[in-house]
Amino acid sequence: MFYLHHHFTTTEKGVIGTVTSLGSSAFSMLPHLETTLRVAGLCVGLAVGIVTLISVLHDLRKKQKQK
């Protein structure tokens, strides 16, 4: 059998601990992040819809003035 004997330095232990903490924090925040992305998607969709409506109304007014 092959065993890898590696003694971690204080810096490596700190990095491993920090990465583990950040990873678990991100994992626990997934529902919150999902909700935020859904709300952001809704806002973008509404903004695009409003801009499209304004553009259509503007085009209709131009056509009515030409008649």
Image: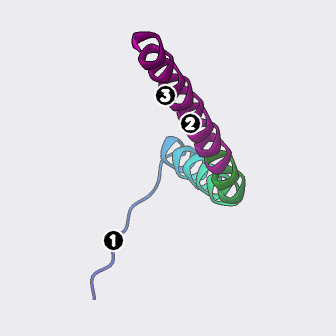
- Are the residues flagged by discs 1 and 3 in contact, CB closer than 8 Å? no
**Residue appearing at x 70%, y 59% in the figure:** 31
Which three-letter amino acid code belongs to the residue tagged 2?
A: Gly
**Residue appearing at x 72%, y 52% in the figure:** 32
- Spatial separation of the CA atoms under disc 1 and disc 3: 68 Å
| Residue 28 spot, x, y in % from top left | 70, 59
Which three-letter amino acid code belongs to the residue tagged 3?
A: Val
Q: Main secondary structure of the magenta part?
A: helix
Classify mark 2: residues with Cα within 10 Å, few (<14), some (14-19) or many (20+): few
Q: Which residue is mark 3?
A: 56
Which three-letter amino acid code belongs to the residue tagged 1?
A: Leu
Q: Nearer the viewer, mark 1 or mark 3?
A: 3
Q: Which residue is mark 2?
A: 49
Q: Nearer the viewer, residue 25 or 39?
A: 39
User: Which residue range is magenta in the image?
Assistant: 38-67
Q: Earlier in the sequence, mark 1 or mark 3?
A: 1
